[in-house]
Image: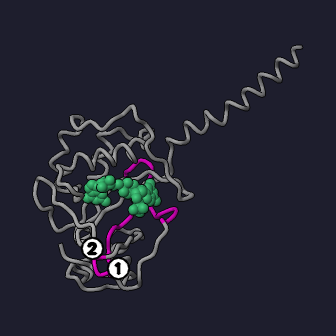
Amino acid sequence: MKLLHASLCLISLLLILPSIFAASSSEDFDFFYFVQQWPGSYCDTQRSCCFPTSGKPAADFGIHGLWPNYKDGTYPSNCDNTKPFDSSSISDLISSMQKSWPTLACPSGSGETFWEHEWEKHGTCSESVIDQHEYFQTALNLKQKTDLLGALTKAGINPDGKSYSIESIRDSIKESTGFTPWIQCNTDESGNSQLYQVYLCVDRSGSGLIECPVFPRGKCGDEINFPSF
Ligand code: 5GP
Ligand code: 5GP
């Protein structure tokens, strides 16, 4: 009888364990992608864009997001619906976010809808390491540390509508940041491939850049446009 009881207990434990493991690991992650977008390439597509209510953003890369990721290329999302976006907890960061994390989607908005989406989809999956204020602060710090436009223009790569080799774009960002970026392209209204987003990888604590454990999928042409904004 005792043996039966003990084996029943063991079986239930074995049944429960995987779900406990899945619940905790779904909120864990290996590294972040820090993704910045070129506004000119968001705006000249068929979808077009709308400037934020605070006005036309600077002609500079803007933050898209800080995305927890797994080393196998998959990623968690929407990890905690009990922690909604709370703009009052980041009131000291709002003016920097308007400058560095502008929204370009239509209709025009202040940016809150974009930041809320990024927090809920990605930020909530980093709660084991950083809270909401730290999440946005970390992204702002990374933006300051990685001057992508400066890196490109120093290498003679300017947002002038001309085309540049993807290799020269990658090399100039590597030269300046010390790490190999992943470049994502989109197409303008005429179908030309162009520089849309730059991915850099960041360690789990959000404090420093690392070499990417895995790159996303997708490919640009060898030569891509860098449109003006
Ligand atoms: P897209 O399909 O346009 O590249 O990505 C759509 C959205 O899916 C992104 O804005 C982002 O929220 C999410 N996403 C796409 N690829 C990745 C990825 O490799 N890692 C993470 N964490 N999110 C991604
Ligand atoms: P993701 O692709 O990160 O999952 O989703 C981006 C969401 O944020 C979309 O719903 C998109 O409409 C919205 N959004 C608002 N502003 C921007 C922007 O400037 N760039 C991008 N990529 N998405 C934005």
The reply to whether callout 2 and callout 1 are in contact (CB within 8 Å) is no
State the extent of the magenta-drawn residues as a range. Answer: 188-216
Q: In what element is the residue under mark 2?
A: helix
Secondary element at tag 1 = strand
The residue wearing badge 1 is 193
Q: Can residue 201 be seen in this view?
A: no
Q: In which quarter of the image is ligand 1?
A: bottom left
**135 left or right of 13?**
left
The outermost residue toward the top is 1
- Residue nearest the observer in this picture, 177 or 118: 118
- Write down the quadrant of residue 34 in the picture: bottom left
Q: Please tell me whether mark 2 or mark 1 is closer to you in this view.
A: 1
Mark 2 and mark 1 lie on one chain; the one further toward the N terminus is 2
Q: Name the residue under label 2.
A: 151
Instruction: Give, as a three-letter code, the residue at label 1.
Output: Ser
Vertically, is 16 above or below 183? above
Instruction: Kindly indicate the quadrant of the structure image that contains residue 126.
Output: top left
Image colouring: one colour
Residue type, numbered disc 2: Ala
